[in-house]
Every structure is written in structure tokens, then in C-alpha cells.
Image (cartoon, coloured by chain):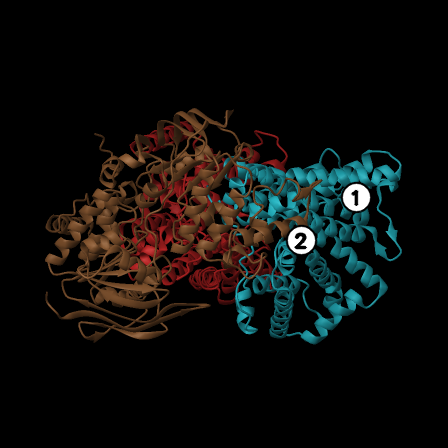
Chain colours: A red, B cyan, C brown
Amino acid sequence: MNKTNRLITIIVTVILVAIVAAYLWDARSTVAVLSSTLRQSTPLVLGALCGLLCERSGVINIGIEGQMLFGAFIGFLANVYTGNLIMAIVAALLAGALSGLLLAYMSVSLKMDQIIAGTVLNILALGVTGYFYQQGLTTQGKLPTVPLGPLADLPLVGPVLFSNPPITYATLLLVMVVHYVLFYTRWGLRTRAVGEKPRAADTLGINVYKVRYWNVIIGGMLAGLAGGFLTLEAVGTFERNMTNGRGFIALAVLIFGKWTPFGAWGGALLFGFAIAAQTQLQLSGAVDIPHQFIGMLPYVLTILVLAGFIGRSRPPAASGIPYEK
Amino acid sequence: MERPNKLQSIAIPLIAVLMALLIGAVIILISGSNPLAAYGALLEGAFGSAKGIARTLEKSTPLIFSGLAVAFAFKAGLFNIGGQGQLLFGALVAGIIGYAVSLPALLHIPLAVLGGCVAGGLYAGLSGWLKTQFGAHEVITTIMLNFIASNITDYVADGPLKDEGIIARLPQIQDSAVLPAIGPVPTGFLLAIVVVFITAWLLDKTTVGYEIQTVGKNPNAAKYAGMKVARTVVLTMFISGLLAGMGGAIETQGVVGRFQPGFNAGLGFEGITIAMLAKTNPYGVIPAALLVGAMQSGASQMQFDAKVAPEIIDVVLGLMLFLVSADMIIRRLIRARGDDDSQPRLSSGWGN
Amino acid sequence: MNKTPILELRGITKQFPGVLANDNIDLTLYQGEIHALLGENGAGKSTLMNILYGLYEPTRGEILVDGKRLALGSPSDAIAAGIGMVHQHFMLVPPFTVTENVILGNEETGAAGRLNTRTAAKQITEISQRYNLEVDPYAIVGDLPVGVQQRVEIIKLLYRNADILIFDEPTAVLTPQEADELVAIMRELVAQGKSIIFITHKLREVLEVADRITVIRRGRMIGSTTPAEADQNKLAEMMVGRAVHLELDKGKATPGETVLAVENLTVNNELAQTAVDDVSFVLREGEVLGLAGVQGNGQTELVEAITGLRRVVRGTITVAGQKATNQSPRKITEMGTAHIPEDRQKHGLVLSYGIDDNLILNTYYQAPFSRAGQRQAQAIQQNAEVLVEKFDVRTPNATAAASTLSGGNQQKVIIARELNRPIKLLIANQPTRGVDVGSIEFIHSQILAQRQAGTAVLLASTELDEILQLSDRIAVMYSGKIMAIVDANKTSKEALGLLMAGVSE
């Protein structure tokens, strides 16, 4: 454990030094890349937190992609028809919760194979959003950047950390909240117990099904919020299959982070950085690589993460196994 | 090797299909169209004319292959949702061999098909290898490889091997590589039926098939019994990808006539629905693929006559997958007993 | 003794699909007594206790605690009524600390919903001092020895102020000395006012600890007695329903040439820790070498290394003169090794396959079952019919799925498969775990028949009685090492118990 902590300290220090050095060398590009890193990572963090809550309670969720898509679509529709961005966020959250309820019903109550349950969710989301989406719908706009007073004027950290739109702030907060809840509260203790050894929890009077249902539903809300980020904060409009594999990358991020909120956050930042850096390189014309190769970078990275880091980490013991009373 | 209840294994998918169509009808009704007219037009489009039937068979052909690919991998407890990427590579390689090589048709056709098979097989085999060597779960790697495949094939079609003109695609394949049609029935479809029989024979009548199914049902027991589990996993993924790649090659050689990106978006997912409707039985893949193929074949007629967006088919397919997978719902409805413990659990090996 | 019934079970009946697990059972527990519930594997003891604890709902019957009716089917209600259970398979969350395990389901929280682990740890320390149950509240449970884990289970009950304690086969995983300590703990608990139901199938323990004994057989109550009125033979007869030969006459061993030679063997477990540490022994034709030890002291890893299922780090294994170190399981099987695996459902069987396909699990690729890569359905079928008959597998037909068989019959399928080919070495790991007495007798006779036929037998078992009954020599494992190899005729349970606890003379 100590060894890991020292390693993390070294890595974080090296990264910080590198950032400062880059800032001194080219302030404008550095700020651009780092802000973009944070925003690119936001849906991945939220997706990973969704997977985290599900898996910590013993339910594998490979339907995050579909849940995001659903949240993105419903959030977008709400924005179109109400013109109220708060309502739109609420709608995205509700859509996510509903998709979580469906996943919980399939995985917990029907005891379906959880990999198939998630796949059902993905395919249904693709079909339903595809059918109901009509081209030409327009919105009143998207969530604005909210600078945090004087903090936003600080060099480097100001524009990167303290001048963001609301869902990006919320995500940073949620990483901490989920960490606290998972490791320091009754809810978290019970969730982890149910994910590791549901029968032990059951013998102590804990309702395994209920714990799983709630975690999967709340996880679904986070995935819905990730979708809302795409349509309400990042792009401002909906496109068919606009999640583009982010739900699956989020799973890789979760595994990279060894099923911990901060680890997942770190993993998401890594992916966010990879995407941001290549975009910046492309824009600056510094490199001449066909766009298809740059476009597939996150997917290659996902495979590398799965192949490289997974051997040393362990998912919750009961993850993927329906509980039979 | 398995002895499932025959009646139930037919009744449950059938009820799932009917229920999905019923729910689809309600959705069509809600969106303000007439479901009877819509389904009528769909049927008319799929089976109403000789041309329609030929189109249905044509649409069903790659679906048989992708459904078979999913069903086959399932037997070893593997979930290959990368059929789309494997199919793309199969189509690409067949397309390259089809235009770049000159041979008599008797050699050219099988060589191009074989090239597509091997390309698809190797691409899926990569996921198998990543699973056995590094513990990367195939569900994520195959889907990531789907995205990578569409990027790479786009690049090839738009880059080094691009045909003249503005469209990003490969040149037309030579006549010697084109799969001919036998009367109204596409050769590809007949080939697909033959492959179904070979696959079923491989699984049920050979020792390799016994190994694959043992690995799927209990990898620990397979290891105990002296089977090479890792090799079986890679082999199964290879064969699964080979089937998908063959579907791609036949699409190129029998239908499109060249490699052109994006012609088959979504086929991978339909393969899952088809495999589940078939209860992963190779023979069951044929009617399931015909059903899905007919829906796709009749979709434009439905759009034209009944003003229903063709995407309704994706919704109905999603519902079918849900209902057939969540078969407990249907079992309750028809008061069938017991559940199906003969299927492998796909989540084994999740994360390590 | 105080004669107030603290607990009454009345007419408990539990019908599972196809099985009547409990048939109209009555049981009364008095305040301050240890009441033994005796019955063989599958008699319905665990079902009865799971009903009492609320994990199952009975088909019929009622339960009274202190004269009040208990709501059935919910552990929470049972816990609230003061019922606690030490489960046979510990209900602990391995990555949690002792404190987290104890408070789970009963957590107290402070500001911002934060768990009060420190207060709880203090309470745990108090309980452990009061009842003599030493344990570190901050230790990770998965790292603790089995005996200490059991203490954590007991503390869990005491933390919830349970008055009625159910111990389900508590000694199965303990050394004889640890079992003695547990008996002392149980007496201490009763002395401080608790009442105990003690579930077991071990006759000796019952006579030693119980105040009263109730025997059940095939889900039915057979009768109640006291240690003063009963002896081992009488209890065995009540338990099984016929006279049982507790002693086996196995005849003299006539060891021949060396079949298995293990030299300086070192093997790691999944966590890359040393599990088998520099172990050496030889095993000869026509003898049974017992491998004794508390669960988790390297026996599993040793057996897996010999059978090719686990990599050898250092050392050599020789089977019938051939190098077997790091060879594939198939090669080792082909050298003439048979393996009855520890966990029959995990390794030994494919549950959804029929008996016929399970019977060819490791010979499927050979003639007559396969020719030119094709399965020979007729040969496979015939083989199954012959073996089902010969090994007395109770099944409607030879193609029934293995999952439909009882534990004893599943084990017979494995034994039929492994013993029906020419073998030189038999490795049997926990061959009678969880099977009924009839099957135990059958399996023991098969093992001894192999010994008579000249097969070298390595028998790993955590049941000392089994080891003592069947072995010619006994190797005791502790913490990955073989403490000693002793002559079975010149040792005692107590001597073996000390070795199992790592104490060497």
C-alpha cells in the first residue's frame, strides 16, 4: 500500500512539473489542452462512477453507453420543448434513472446474464433514440461557462479549473462525494459488502436486492448526466449514436482506476488528455497523420489499458453473479 | 450434447417476436401512424414480389453469418460483439483481392472469400488472444476493435487504394471474383446455409466442438480434463471472426461489387439479436436471420406506404432481444417450468 | 438446569421442488443449554436452521421465542429476537476489517453519516475480553486464520446481543485443539446465560459437549436423547437408520515400487505467495498416504501442482519414473494418474452435461470415443450405461444432466470416470465431502480396493477420522510445509492435531 502511495505521489509530482514547464513554454496551448482534457474527461468520469456504483454492489454494467445515449437524447428533447436547461438536466437524470431501473430489473430480478442485460440496454437505446429523433430540432443554447469569481483570474489554474460549465464542476464534486459515501458511510459499507459477499450481507438482515437496485438506479442517473453533458454542455445538439463508445471507454477507465473514484478520475484525465493533445496537434498542423488514425487513439488506448493494467487489479468478488436467496 | 426442452426453445423466441411486434405496433400508433398498414407494407415489401424475396434473401445472408458468429462464440462462453469490425475487414480484404488480383473465376472467387475469412478470423482472434494473455474482456475489446476497424477501413478506402473519383471507395472487383446468382437465389445465401450445417456439425459431432462447449460451460473442468483452454478460446474467436469475415466477403463479392465503407453499419448488433432468438442454435440462426432480413427488406416500402421511419425496426429488434433474453417473463406467461442452465455465463473472467 | 424453553420450533415443514427437506420437526431449546442437532449430510439440519434464522421461509410450522411467535422469513426479525448464527461457511466479507464485518447491518453513524468505527472497535475489544475471544478489531478478515475468523463470527452475534446462538458444523474447519478451544468458548457462553444449538455430524463431539441431543434423518425427527443415555454406536444407528461399521478393516499394506516422488517442491498461490514450501515425499504402489491438515495449509496447491493444474516454482515431481514437473494435466493423466478433485462442481463435472458426457471428460479424444476427430455417440452411450450400473449411480438414465444428481451420486460419476481406466496413481482430494453415509462407505471401499490392486493413493482430507481410517502413512501439512510423516498405526488424533497446529515434537 505504501509503495503504491509513493508511486502515485511521484507520478503526480512529475505531471505537475511537466504542466508548469509546458505553461512557461507555451501558455496558450497548455491552457487550451488542459481545459479540453478536463471537459473531455467529464463524461468518462461520470460513466465510470456509474459503473463503479453498479459493480461495487455486484452488477456489471456494460450498458453505460446506452444509458448515456438515452440521457443525452431525453435531455436534448427537454431542452427543445421546455427551453429550460435545468429542466433538461433533470430530464437527463430521470432518463438515466429509468435506464438504471430497467438494468436492475434485468440483472437483479430476472437474473439475466448481466453482459446480455447491458447489451440489451445499448441496443434498445440506439433503436429508440434513432426512431424518435427528428432532424431539424433546435435548442435555445447550452449551459454557459460559470467563472468562479477571482479564482478564475489565477494564471493556469484559473482558466483550467475555475472557469467551467456546471456539469464539469458537478463531476469534480461527485468524485469526492462518491468516494466519501463509498468508504465512510453506512450506505457504502453495505454496498461494498453486497458486491463482495452478498450472502454475508443477507444474513445480517441487509436486503441485497434493494441495495443493488438503488446503486444501479443512482449509477444510471450519473450516466444520464454524462449524456446530458454531451447534448446540454458540450455539443448543444443531438446526433445519432453520438456517445461514440464513451460508455465503453468509461468501463476501461473504471478498471484502470481499480474500482475507486479517484483512480477512475485519474484514468479519465489520461484519456481526456490523449484526446485533447491529439486535437491540439492536429489543429496546430504540427503533425500530419490521417485523421482516421488520430480518431482511433482513445479506442486503442482502451485496449491497452485493459490488457496492461487489469492483471493486477480485482473487481468486486460478486460482480456479475445474480444473487439467489 | 445438450438436451433442452424442444418445444420451449421454439415457443419462447416465437412469443418474444410476437410481443415485440405488438409493442412496436403500439409505438407506431403513438407516433400517429397505422400499425396494420405499416406491417402490411413491410410484408408486401419483403415477400410481395420476386424482387422483394430476392432482396430479403440478400439481406438475410450477412445476417446469417453475423448471427452464426455470435452464436458460435457463445458456445465457448465468449461474447463476440465485434462482428461488425470483423465483417468490415472481411469485406475489405475480399475487395482488395477482388480487384487487385487476376485469376480465373474458379480460383478467384474462393481466394477472395478465403482472404475475407482469414482477415475476419485474425481480427477476432486478436480479441481472444488479448483475453487469454492479458485478461482483457472480449466484450470491450471487440467493440473497441469495431471502432478501430471502421477507422482503418475508412482510411484505406479514402487513402492508398482509393478508386478514381470523389467517393471514398475501392475500385470495382473484377468479374472473375463476382459471386454469380443461381436463378433468383443469391449464391451467397446458399453458401450461408451450407456453413450453418458445417458449424452445427463441428459443434455437436466433433471432439473440437466438445472442447469448445466444455470450455464454455465450465473452464475449470476443461482445464482439469486436460483441454487447452486458452487455445480453445483463441480458436473459437478465430472461427467466430471467420464466419463474420465470410459474411463481409460475400457482401462485397455478391452484392456490392466492391468495398465501400459504411454499407453495413449496425450488423454486429443484429447478429446478437439473431443469435439470441436462435437460442444460440446454429440451425435456429436461419429463421431468425430471415425474419430480420425480411424486416430490413420491407422497411423502405413501409416508409413509403405507411410513413413510418425505418428505425422502428431497430426498436422492435431491441425489444425482441430484451424479451428473448429476459425469458423469465415469457416463462411466467406460458407457465413453463425450470430455467435454462445450459447457457454459459459470459461475465466470467470479468476484470481478471 | 433452568427449565424455561427459550425457543420452540413446532411442526416445521419445508418443501423444496422435488424434496421434502424438513418434515414436521419439533425442537425445544431451554435457557442455558447446549442442544446438539445431529444428522448426516443432507438430513435437513441446515435447512431447519436457515428457517429459524429467517433465510428460508417454511412451508408450514411456527417458531416461538420466549413464548412469542417469531415472524418468519426475515433474518432481521430473527436477529431482533436475539437469534444469531455461526454459519458453516463463514459469512464474512474478506476485504473488510474485523470491525467493519461486525458492525455491518448494525452500523452507528455520526455527523455527515460517517461510520463510528472507533467506538465500535472499542466495543469489540470489550466483548473479546469478556468472553475470551482474542482478536484485533483492525485486522483484515481475509488475512486471519480460520480459527480467528470463527471468533469474529461469534463476536458478530454477541455485538447484536444474541441470546440464542446457532453453531452450524463449527468444528469442520478446525484442528482438534482449536475444536477443544471452541468447546471451552461454548461452555463460557452458556455459563454467561446464552443458549446454544450445535449442529454437527460428529458423534464424539456431541457426546462431549451437548446437554441434550436431537437426531434427524431425511428431514424427519428421529428422537431425542442425552449423552448419559447414548453412545457412539447408538447415535450412529439413529443417524443413519441402520447399524454402521465405524471401524474399517483394511488389511496390511504391501508397498511396492515408488510411483510418486516429490522433491523440494515449492508452489505459489494466486497471490504469488508461497503456498507449498520445499515439500518432499514418496508414495509407493499399494499404499495410502494421507495428507492431513487444516484447510488452506497448502494441500490444495500441492495436489494441483502434482496434477498439472498449477505451476511448480521449484523442485521436481516424478510419476511412475517420468518427469511430471510442469507437465500438462493431459500428459500427467496419460502417465496413469487419476484425480478426484476437491471441488466436484468446480473442477470435476460439467453440470449441464449429461452423465455420459461427464464420463468421458478426460478421455473424449481417445478411441473408442473419438475417431478421426469425430465423436462416437454409440461408444459414449455404452460406456455411460456400463459405468452407471457398475458404480451404482442412482439416476433415471445415463443421459440425465449431472446437475440433477445428489452430491453422493455426482461424486460416484467422478469416481467411475477416474477409476475405470488403468491407473498407477490415485489422487483423491476430500473425496467424501458433503456426501451421505452410504456413499462414504462406497467411496472408501473403492479407495481401499485400488490400494489392494497396487495403486498408489494420495488421500488429502480435512477429516481426521477419514485419514486415520484409510491411510497407511500420514503426512501433516502446516503453513505449506510437511510437519512430519507418521505411521498411521502409531499415532493418535491428539498427536496429529498438534502437528496440524504447527507444533512439532
Q: Nearer the viewer, residue B232 or C384?
A: C384
Q: Nearer the viewer, mark 2 or mark 1?
A: 2
Rendered view: A81 above or below B164: below
Q: Which residue is mark 2?
A: B67
Q: Nearer the viewer, residue A255 or C453?
A: C453
Q: Nearer the viewer, residue C346 or C354?
A: C354
Q: Which residue is mark 1?
A: B258
Which chain does the residue under circle 2 lie in? Answer: B
Residue C143, picture quadrant: top left
Residue at mark 2 to residue at mark 1: CA–CA distance = 23 Å
Left/right placement of residue A288 relative to residue C83 reads right
Residue B183: where, in percent of width, then height? 89, 56
**Amino acid at dot 1:** Arg
Q: Residue at x 43, y 48 (%)?
A: C443
Q: Residue at x 39, y 26 (%)?
A: C265
Which chain does the residue under circle 1 lie in? Answer: B
Residue A303: where, in percent of width, then height? 53, 39
**Amino acid at dot 2:** Gly
Mark 1: few, some, or many residues within 10 Å (few <14, many ≥20)?
many
- Closer to the N terminus: mark 2 or mark 1? 2
